[in-house]
Image (cartoon, rainbow, N blue to C red):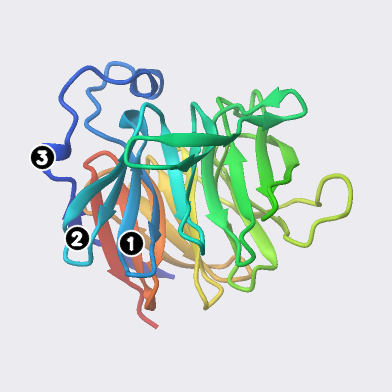
């Protein structure tokens, strides 16, 4: 197994760091902490810009390849993750509002806040399938003592289906490179679960533990690449892990500073270049994975 250290790449500019009263989300998750931001939900667009969500203060940042930060959306909400569809729509999971679509810089519309008279617990992460389907997690405040976290799929026509309802904090989610598997971070169990993306006509898919981890809080953001690798951001451990397609650990990548590892993303033009997000210092790190 490789032991690697990531290098600093970008840091949230001082002008974007919140100085006022912490938001409701900040007080709930980090009581007593003066939270300047909480960055996660990393993904790249077609122009190689890196996008990040700032959960407590309702912002979505875009970072250019040259390192220029820009606020693209700012709402009264708690966006955890966003993706851009093939037709240019900005869809996000918001802990407070549910599944939303940004309609402007400071405006949005709610696409869904639950199904069957069952409101969302508090959405956490999402990924976009090739056919336009959305897979997303609904963690709320679930844990091992209350394993009620959920996973949903929204088809291109808008139909919403509840897939799993027993996860100890369903968090990061991504598809395998061949789109045959769905990986879900069960944070409070310190596990990554997997199930087939070819869903049964009725009922829940068969789910198994793909990776058992230890240390920190548990896995947060997930990302896959064309090699079949799975990158895992290990929350509150200052590191990320890299696994092959059968679950063997290939590398451990530590950050030189910061413990709040929230998100990972592979560069769109280089599957060996991994970006790692640290929310403690609002920083982006990168690491080249050697062959």
Disc 3 element: helix
Answer above or below: position of 79 versus 194: above
Q: Are there few (<14), some (14-19), or many (20+) residues within 10 Å of tag 2?
A: few
Q: In the rendered image, which residue does mark 1 sit on?
A: 275
Q: Nearer the viewer, residue 250 or 194?
A: 194
Answer above or below: position of 217 versus 233: above
Residue at position x 39%, y 69% from top? 46
Residue reaching furthest right? Answer: 202
Q: Position of residue 109 (x, y in %)?
A: 50, 35
Residue at position x 18%, y 20% from top? 20
Q: In the rendered image, which residue does mark 3 sit on?
A: 14
Q: Nearer the viewer, residue 151 or 236?
A: 151
Q: Are there few (<14), some (14-19), or many (20+) residues within 10 Å of tag 3?
A: few
Q: Are there few (<14), some (14-19), or many (20+) residues within 10 Å of tag 1?
A: many
Tag 2 near tag 1, CB within 8 Å: yes
Q: In the rendered image, which residue does mark 2 sit on?
A: 9
């Amino acid at each position: 197994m490789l032991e690697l250290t990531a290098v600093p790449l970008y840091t949230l500019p001082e002008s974007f760091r919140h100085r006022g009263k912490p938001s409701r989300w900040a007080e709930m998750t980090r009581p007593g902490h003066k939270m300047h931001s909480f960055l996660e939900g990393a993904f790249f667009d077609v122009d190689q810009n890196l996008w990040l969500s700032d959960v407590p203060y309702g912002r979505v940042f875009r970072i250019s390849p040259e390192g220029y930060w820009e606020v693209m959306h700012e709402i009264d909400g708690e966006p955890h993750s966003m993706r851009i569809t093939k037709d240019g729509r900005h869809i996000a999971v918001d802990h407070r509002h549910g599944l939303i679509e940004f309609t402007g810089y400071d405006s949005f519309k709610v696409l869904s806040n639950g199904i069957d008279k069952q409101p969302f617990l508090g959405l956490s992460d999402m990924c976009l399938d090739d056919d336009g389907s959305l897979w997303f997690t609904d963690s709320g405040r679930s844990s091992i003592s209350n394993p009620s976290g959920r996973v949903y799929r929204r088809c291109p026509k808008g139909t919403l289906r509840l897939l799993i309802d027993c996860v100890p904090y369903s968090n990061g989610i991504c598809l395998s490179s061949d789109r045959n598997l769905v990986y879900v971070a069960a944070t409070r169990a310190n596990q990554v679960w997997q199930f087939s993306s070819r869903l049964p006509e009725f009922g829940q898919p068969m789910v198994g533990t793909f990776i058992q981890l230890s240390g920190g809080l548990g896995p947060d953001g997930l990302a896959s690449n064309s090699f079949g690798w799975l990158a895992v951001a290990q929350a509150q451990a200052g590191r990320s892990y890299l696994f092959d397609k059968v679950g063997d650990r290939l590398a451990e990548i530590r950050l030189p500073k910061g413990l709040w590892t929230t998100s990972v993303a592979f560069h769109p033009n280089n599957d060996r270049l991994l970006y790692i997000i640290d929310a403690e210092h609002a920083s982006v790190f990168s690491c080249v994975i050697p062959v």
